[in-house]
Image (cartoon, rainbow, N blue to C red):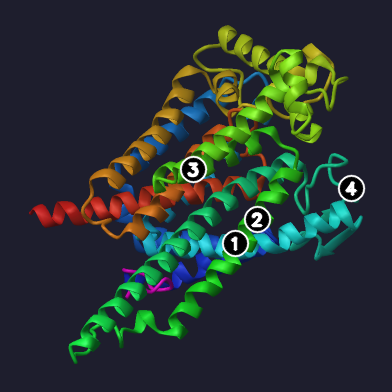
Amino acid sequence: MKRPFHHPNPGLQSFWNYAQLGLLIFPLSPFIGAVGMVLALLGTWIAQYRTIIRRPLNWGFALLSFLLIITASFAYDKIAAFLGLFNFLPFFLLFAAFSRLIQTSAQLRQMSWIMVLSSLPVVILGFGQLFLDWSFKLRVLGFVVEWDIEPGGEPLGRMASIFMHANTLAGYLMIVFILALGLWVESYRLIRRQGEEGKRGREDKQTKGRGGGGSIYSHHPHHSPHFAHFLHLPFLFLTVAVIANFVALILTNSRNAWAIAIFACLAYAFYEGWRILVASVAGVSASVLLAAFAPSPIAQLFRRVVPAFFWARLNDQLYPDRPIALLRKTQWQFALSLTQQRPWTGWGLRNFTSLYEVQMHIQLGHPHNLFLMLLAETGLPTAFLFCGLLGWIFVAGVQLLQKSKYVEEAEDKLIFFSYLIVFVGWVLFNTADVSLFDFRLNVLSWLLLSAISGVVYHYNRDERLQVR
């Protein structure tokens, strides 16, 4: 039996414990949670230094680090560019360490449970913010615990909970929702399997009883009432967690997160072969899209059943008077124009803000697209290398899921699949936003990327050893 708290390498057990504790606390207190993660990071680097530096993927991130430093040297505002390096370089070290620390699907499952558990206080505070007008500022030693909850949300009417902005909360909930949905599907599988095996056992017992014999199923522990009760408790908890996270995600009013949630539901439905669910989700999505974008006679028909909260948000009628400078299309066009002017070195990290303010006379933190931002700020070679390394991680993960004989258990494949869906969701989210400027989102993003890479390395190493 796989033990979730057990690490396959006893020498890394204590660092894995620090990482789990840090991950549990991290959403509520990034400072305290980061202490555990830093201890895990440093301990893993010290204990596994030789293994870490031999991995080609880490060489790629070392090259990327070098190119980022070079581009900062040619930046329009060099101070801002060198400060921007802190959004990347420390996280490459985190990726290298945790891709060694995280090695098995059991660890992935444990991480998913931890993140789902820690999301519930965040969601509860968000519901209180919107529906009970909760408003408070909590400071413990200035930065150890720092909660700012604005009544009615931030912006007004959009759930933000303890995050600075609704879009940031949406990015966090997107990750948790996908992982929670994966655990829910796994729990549903186990309950269904237990029911089918119990039914076969009862039928076999009746058949054997008529012949005077016993049944091998009659005393199987998995068919006991206690085991069935044990399976139903996690399922009920996960059902509540999935619904709560999904409702909270809707209330962030993030179109980007809505689309990713629908994509995740479709992905799981396809994976499980639930055709009715695929058709239902596709039908609901098509109805919302037609209500938002179809010609007026057709749109009016669908608007009778689709709430304006959804279709008016999609086509921007909910916020009709937004300045042109705040539209994503305008920001993306400006980022592309910057890329054309400096295609090789870019303008430097964190330089988009000042350049956009000079041009548009409005302050904007980023162009709401990570990849266009990197093109504009770091140039083509650096941006393409960054995307290439991410592609390497994803392709290796897909290959492992398809071919490796070491991920044989259906539940293990499902958990690994859920992390690949999070990866796709993260990419989609960053095509209409930028997650790296929020410390919590940036840490969680690189942690999940390292988890995929670590499992790939672990099982591929076992496969090579088996071949020898």
Badge nearest the viewer, 4 or 1: 1
**Part of the protein shown in magenta:** 1-8
Q: Badge 1, how many Cα within 10 Å: few under 14, some, many 20+? A: some
User: Where is mark 1, residue-wise?
Assistant: 239
User: Where is mark 2, residue-wise?
Assistant: 243
Q: Badge 2, how many Cα within 10 Å: few under 14, some, many 20+? A: some
SS majority, magenta:
loop
Q: Is residue 406 magenta?
A: no
Give the secondary structure at mark 2: helix
User: Where is mark 4, residue-wise?
Assistant: 152
Q: Earlier in the sequence, mark 4 or mark 1?
A: 4
What's the amino acid at mark 4?
Gly
Q: Badge 4, how many Cα within 10 Å: few under 14, some, many 20+? A: many
Q: Residue at x 36, y 56 (%)?
A: 100
Horizontal and vertical percent for residue 255? 69, 33
User: Where is mark 3, residue-wise?
Assistant: 276
What's the amino acid at mark 2?
Ile
Q: Earlier in the sequence, mark 4 or mark 3?
A: 4
Give the secondary structure at mark 3: helix
- Residue 84 seen in this snapshot: no
Q: Earlier in the sequence, mark 4 or mark 2?
A: 4
Give the secondary structure at mark 1: helix
Q: Residue furthest bottom?
A: 212
CA gap, disc 2 and disc 3: 20 Å
Q: Residue furthest front?
A: 210
